[in-house]
Image (cartoon, grey):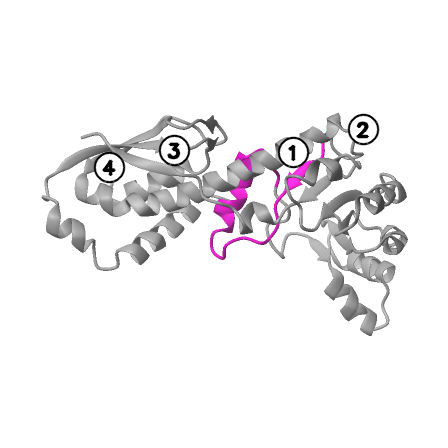
Amino acid sequence: MLTRQVIRKAVEAALEEDAPNGDITCATTIPLQAWGEVRLVARERGVMSGIDVFAAAFKMQNPEIVVTPAIADGERFEPGRMLATVSGPVRDLLTAERVALNFTQRMCGIATMTDTFVAAADQARTLPGYRVPRTYAATRIVDTRKTTPGLRPFEKYAVVCGDGHNHRYGLSDAVMVKDNHLAALAEQGIDMAGAIRHIREQVGHTTHIEVEVDRLEQIPAALDGGADTIMLDNFTLEDTRAGVDMIDGRAIVEASGTMTVERVPEVASTGVDVISVGALTHSVRSIDLGLDWVR
C-alpha cells in the first residue's frame, strides 16, 4: 500500500542518492536567501498519479516549500495544463526538482498506459461475438509482479489511478501455482488436482488459489482440484474461447502472455474476466512533465 510512511522512506532514499553531500551546483551559484516559484506543467496528455509524492519530495527537502496541487490523482490532463505550483527557497526547489519529477513522470506513465489498456478492453463490446465475463461487468486489466524493485507500492498505485486493478501484491498474498511449481510437483508424483487439494488443506479459507495452465488439457484438473482462478497463459484466441467455455463460470478466468493494446480487444471479447499485463510496469514510458520558472 502507498502509505505516507512508504512515500517518506522512498523519497528520503532518493534525495540521499541524488545529493549525498549536498547540491554543489546550487551551493555555488544560487544566493542562500533567493526565493522562487515554479509550475508543474504537462507537455503531453496523460493521467495523473503521484501528486502527493511530488509534493513530498519538495517538503522533505525543505518544509518551508509550499506545494499547491491543481489536479487530483486519476484525473486526465492535456498538454499545457498547469498541474501544481511550488514556491520556496530556490536552492531547495532546484535540488528536489529531479527526484519529484522522476517519481511523478513514471507514475503518470503507468497510469496513462493503464488507461489506454482499459479503453482497449472496453472496445471489445463493439466486436462481433462479444461475450460478457461471468465474474465482472467488464473484463478487468490488472498488473503483475514485474515491477521495479523497491517501487512496487508506487507502481501498483499508479495502475489503480489509470482505472486498472491490482493482481496479488506479492508472494505472501495468494497462492499462484505456475508451470515451474507444477513441474517440481510432478517430479514428486503429485498431479495438478492433488496439488490444489493439498494446498487448500494448508491455507486459510480466505486464501485465493490461482493455477496457470498453458494448454486446454490441463483445465479439467484445475477445476477438479478447486482452483479459484485459472490463468490461460499464451493461449490463442480460439483456445481462449474454448477455455472460457470449459471453465463455465466455475472459476475466474485470467488471460495472460504478451498482451498488447492491439490484441486486448479481441482477447476481452472471448469473455475472460481478467487480462494481466506485465507491460504496465516493466515497459512503461514516463510522461513528459516540466517545471516552468515563474519568478
Q: Quadrant of the C terminus?
A: top left
Q: Residues within 10 Å of mark 4 (few under 14, many from 20)?
A: many
Q: Mark 2 belongs to which amino acid?
A: Pro
Q: Which residue is mark 3?
A: 43
Picture layout, residue 38 above or below residue 206? above
What number is the disc on residue 220?
A: none
Q: Nearer the viewer, mark 1 or mark 2?
A: 2
Q: Which residue is mark 2?
A: 128
Q: Mark 1 belongs to which amino acid?
A: Ala
Q: Residues within 10 Å of mark 2 (few under 14, many from 20)?
A: few
Residue span colored magenta = 137-165
The residue at the point 59 percent across, 50 percent down is 169
Cα distance between the residues tagged 1 and 3: 24 Å
Q: Which residue is mark 4?
A: 65
Viewed as shown, does residue 264 lie left or right of 221?
left
What number is the disc on residue 120?
A: 1
The residue at the point 38 percent across, 33 percent down is 43
Q: Mark 4 belongs to which amino acid?
A: Ile
Picture layout, residue 83 above or below residue 204? above
Dot 2 or dot 4: first in sequence order is 4
Dot 1 or dot 3: first in sequence order is 3
- The reply to whether callout 1 and callout 3 are in contact (CB within 8 Å) is no
Q: Position of residue 254 (x, y in %)?
A: 74, 45
Dot 1 or dot 2: first in sequence order is 1
Dot 3 or dot 4: first in sequence order is 3
Q: Mark 4 falls on what kind of element?
A: loop
Dot 1 or dot 4: first in sequence order is 4
Q: Mark 2 falls on what kind of element?
A: loop
Cα distance between the residues tagged 2 and 4: 55 Å
